[in-house]
Amino acid sequence: MADPVFTMKGVTKVYDTGGAKVHALAGVDLELPGGELAVLLGPSGSGKSTLLNILGGLDHVTDGRVWFRDLELTAMRDRELTRYRRDHVGFIFQFYNLVPSLTARENVQLVTDVARDPMPAAEALDSKTGIQVLEALHQINRDFGTATVVITHNADIQKIAHRVIFFQDGRISRIQENTERLAPADISW
Ligand SMILES: Nc1ncnc2c1ncn2[C@@H]1O[C@H](COP(=O)(O)OP(=O)(O)OP(=O)(O)O)[C@@H](O)[C@H]1O
Ligand SMILES: [Mg+2]
């Protein structure tokens, strides 16, 4: 694979909640190239959000190393990670990631606050359906060669992916390459 956008080597993440240790990621090696849309699938608690939070510079690994191109995320302090997020990362959170104590507008504001050039909150509130979001991702992925990672519980969404990465117990259990892909408008919801 030529020049991956993301490289993860031996990544582990252990949450220590005062006594009980949870191995959210238990040794993940992964390369994600530009221009590719990857879908992460797996049971609840298998580590999908943990992985995405680490790639997005929102969380630190317990062990292992992570690079964005030639920038090593695991060597960065919080200030550098903030800069990395602003310069290189786009997030779209689904409604179940919202903070319940905040209003819808405040929730959108929370996300736009971390971006360098955010849309006005009222405008971002307008986005209507999952299909429109996926179509926008699809187009950005194609036109700008981004590495795009989508987490979903809708197994049908895997049909739009170049690669489907299956998680189980904090590990990648299987990677499936799709030779044929559906357009977002053609998947069932
Ligand atoms: N902040 C945290 N503190 C303690 N444990 C956590 C924390 N975040 C996640 N975990 C635990 O780490 C494991 C992986 O969680 P993660 O959120 O990455 O799973 P997921 O695959 O995204 O699940 P879901 O499909 O429900 O979103 C789970 O056992 C979860 O309970
Ligand atoms: Mg999750």
Image (tube, rainbow, N blue to C red):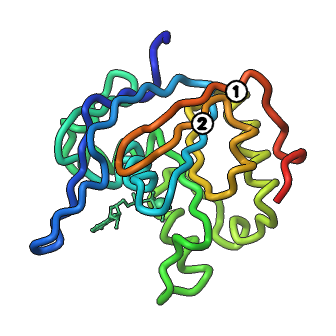
* Image quarter of residue 138: top right
Between 11 and 46, the one nearer to me in the picture: 46
Residue identifier under label 2: 164
- Mark 1: which amino acid? Asn
| Residue drawn at point x = 31 percent, y = 28 percent | 71
Residue 35 sits above or below residue 111 on the image:
above
| Residue drawn at point x = 75 percent, y = 38 percent | 160
Between 96 and 84, the one nearer to me in the picture: 96
Residue 67 sits above or below residue 113 on the image:
above
Q: Residue furthest top?
A: 2
Give the x, y percent position of residue 121: 64, 70
* Residue density around tag 1, few if under 14, some if 14–19, many if 20 or more, within 10 Å: some
Q: Which mark is residue 178?
A: 1
- Mark 2: which amino acid? Val
Q: Is residue 146 left or right of residue 65?
A: right
Secondary-structure class at tag 2: strand
Q: Which mark is residue 27?
A: none
Give the x, y percent position of residue 78: 23, 51
**Residues tagged 2 and 1 counted as in contact (Cβ below 8 A):** yes
